[in-house]
């Protein structure tokens, strides 16, 4: 397959054509491509081609939630996210009792073995229960607990977790950071009342990420920089951001960009069941949430995930920073791929990598999404 007449954004600059063989990018170039008579040629008429977006923090969408623990839920999420340019995602759990979490993780394991339509299911992420109840946000405080080896090791042993969220200031959680690092599972600092010193200690133990930076974290004070100050200042920490203009003020988005550009900012959706649905009431574990004015909230007003999509997040980052897509693309693909340790095969458009592609217009409207060379979404217009 040969993609021509394109504006292909690569780490080495812009290219004009790309050939794909067996789902892998086999060549990229500027001049006239070599085509044989049996080559399938796709002329994309000047459209921009980006590496497919990777959403490492995705709870649900289109009426589905990871905690439903059904293949239909994961498939519904995969199909929905592909419409927004996502080619890979982590199924992210909510803080729940052990049985519900085990069922959700087993479902991810079973679906990874089979084939899910749409974006590729890249594994699971455990957001809770090992958090700090003081910064629970919309995570159910009833179920937040410390990391007990019997339970936590059983979760890790299922073999699907790629990221585990941990409040590092809780002494009983420290061993879990070490155990995740030993297994190559990334630790993200989350829902936490930590001091800056606690964060420095967690980073020294091997934590590499900050979960939805600014949200559910101790704020920056100039004499106690808190979690926010520490994760912005430490170069080894990648910062997730919910760039919907609701969770984080546009100026705060710019602060994260200024501290972390170009390769340490990770856009996430943090989307939940209500994403892509009409305004109204939705279930969120055994509680209710309301989607209204582009925000999902518990009855008391607490934000409960988002209805954000990755294409909109990237568009918001472009608007807020005034930077072109050429300098921002990696926040939605390469940086999350690096966070997952899969940047050798995903996250950027280079020869030898998977043909995970998102075709967008100048205003970043997704027209076509391809996973490993297969078209998983094509817009009608
Ligand atoms: Zn959260």
Image: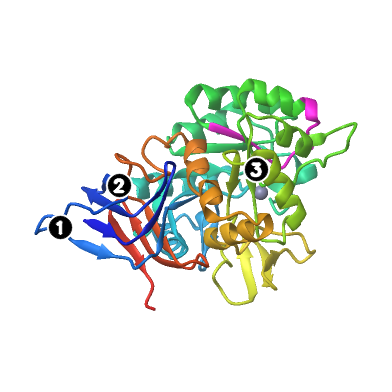
Mark 1 Cβ inside 8 Å of ligand 1? no
Q: Position of residue 226 (x, y in %)?
A: 81, 35
Q: Position of residue 254 (x, y in %)?
A: 71, 50
Of the numbered discs 3 and 1, the one sitting upstream in the chain is 1
Disc 3, SS: loop
Mark 3 Cβ inside 8 Å of ligand 1? yes
Of the numbered discs 1 and 2, the one sitting upstream in the chain is 2
Query: Where 271 sits versus 106, above or below?
Result: below
Q: Nearer the viewer, mark 2 or mark 3?
A: 2
Q: Position of residue 381 (x, y in %)?
A: 39, 78
Look at 53% across and 61% down and name the residue there: 311
In screen coordinates, is 242 left or right of 197?
Answer: left
Any mark on residue 211, and which? Answer: 3
Q: Which residues are magenta?
A: 186-197
Indicate yes or no whether the magenta region holds residue 11: no
Q: Which residue is mark 2?
A: 28
């Amino acid at each position: 397959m040969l993609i021509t007449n394109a504006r292909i954004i690569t780490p080495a600059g812009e290219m004009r054509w790309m050939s794909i063989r067996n789902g892998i990018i086999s060549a990229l170039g500027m001049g006239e491509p070599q085509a044989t008579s049996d080559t399938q040629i796709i002329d994309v008429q000047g459209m921009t081609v980006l590496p497919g977006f990777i959403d490492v923090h995705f709870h649900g969408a289109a009426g589905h939630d990871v905690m439903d623990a059904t293949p239909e839920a994961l498939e519904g999420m995969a199909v929905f996210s592909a419409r927004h340019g996502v080619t890979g995602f982590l199924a992210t759990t909510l803080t729940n009792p052990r049985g519900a979490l085990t069922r959700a993780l087993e479902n991810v394991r079973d679906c990874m073995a089979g084939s899910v339509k749409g974006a590729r299911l890249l594994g699971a992420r455990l957001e809770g229960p090992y958090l700090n109840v003081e910064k629970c946000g919309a995570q159910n405080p009833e179920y937040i607990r410390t990391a007990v080896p019997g339970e936590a090791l059983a979760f890790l042993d299922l073999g699907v977790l790629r990221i585990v969220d941990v409040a590092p200031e809780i002494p009983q959680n420290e061993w879990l950071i070490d155990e995740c690092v030993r297994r190559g599972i990334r630790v993200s600092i989350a829902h936490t009342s930590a001091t800056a010193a606690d964060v420095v200690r967690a980073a020294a133990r091997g934590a590499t990420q900050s979960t939805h930076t600014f949200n559910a974290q101790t704020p920056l004070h100039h004499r106690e920089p808190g979690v926010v100050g520490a994760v912005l200042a430490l170069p080894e920490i990648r910062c997730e951001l919910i760039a919907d203009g609701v969770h984080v003020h546009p100026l705060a988005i710019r602060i994260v960009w200024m501290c972390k550009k170009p390769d340490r900012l990770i856009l996430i959706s943090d989307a939940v069941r209500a994403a892509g649905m009409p305004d109204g009431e939705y279930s969120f574990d055994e509680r209710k949430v309301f989607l209204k004015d582009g925000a999902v909230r518990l009855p008391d007003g607490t934000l409960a995930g988002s209805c954000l999509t990755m294409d909109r997040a990237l568009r918001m980052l472009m608007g807020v920073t005034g930077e072109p897509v050429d300098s921002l693309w990696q926040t939605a693909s390469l940086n999350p791929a690096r966070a997952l340790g899969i940047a050798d095969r995903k996250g950027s458009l280079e020869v030898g990598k998977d043909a995970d592609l998102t075709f967008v217009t100048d205003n970043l409207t997704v027209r076509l999404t391809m996973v490993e060379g297969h078209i998983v979404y094509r817009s009608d217009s």
